[in-house]
Amino acid sequence: MKIDLSNFLQWRINVFFYKRLSWKVAFFYIYTLGTLFFSLNRKEKEEIESAIHTVFDDRKDNSEIKAVLRNVFRGIFSHYYEKLFNAFSSAETLKTFLDMHIQKQGITAIRRALSNGKGVLLVTGHFGGVEFIPAFLAANSCPVTIIAKFSSEHLRETSIQKAKNFSTRIIDADNTPNIMKAVFDNLRGNRIVITQCDEIGEWRPSRKNTLFF
């Protein structure tokens, strides 16, 4: 079975080191692991590079394109760092980080919507540090439910345990027989249900039309 970057970074030996390094040092460890992964999986790296060249070849010179490539790979590693920090840092460390680095802009609008008693459906694109949204809202005493899929059993177990520290519920998309019923039940309970538009395989604008990605 082919190992993808997500599973590779979640190997138990790697998680062991994340937890014992400071999280600042852990970023450079993840960056090194990611660089190693792409050096061993040249095809995936070449596909990313090809996509960048397709978009920018007629807009930027070679030095600018190289800078974009560096930033793209750094962005990939930063994204996984956020996911791993969110999942495997201690609850106290995560709460301290959220309090120090994330502003509360917009949270009053969510609380105002909750005052209607019908729950809030919060839909976001996968842009920026979206992994922190559920924990941030829960740390600010908002009743949060998140729809999630997990790339490993270890991540599932850790996330469910972490959610208990934040009074957060998880709708496990792979193990919930009727996701829509679970969503409506949580909305009726006047909770914030969060889902991300991410990793879409197809979109069905109607019953007769399907667009594949």
Image (spheres, grey):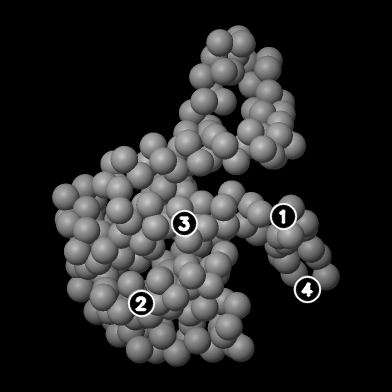
Q: Name the residue under label 4.
A: 207
Where residue 210 appears, as percent x and y from the top left, is 79, 63
Amino acid at pointer 3 = Ile
- Residue 161 is labelled as 2
Mark 4 or 2, nearer chain start: 2
- How far apart in space, not on screen, are marks 2 and 1 (Cα)? 28 Å
Amino acid at pointer 4 = Arg
Where residue 60 appears, as percent x and y from the top left, is 60, 14
Q: Which mark lies nearer to you, 4 or 3?
A: 3
Where residue 13 appears, as percent x and y from the top left, is 46, 56
- How far apart in space, not on screen, are marks 4 and 1 (Cα)? 34 Å
Q: How many labels does the image show?
A: 4
Mark 3 or 2, nearer chain start: 3
Q: Mark 1 points at which residue?
A: 2
Q: In which quarter of the image is residue 144?
A: bottom left
Front position in the image: 132 or 46: 46
Label 2 near label 3: C-beta < 8 Å?
no
Left or right of 107 in this view: 194: right
Q: What secondary structure is found at the residue carrying circle 4?
A: loop
Mark 4 or 3, nearer chain start: 3
Q: Name the residue under label 3.
A: 13
Q: Which mark lies nearer to you, 2 or 1?
A: 1
- How far apart in space, not on screen, are marks 3 and 2 (Cα)? 20 Å
Amino acid at pointer 2 = Gln
Mark 3 or 1, nearer chain start: 1
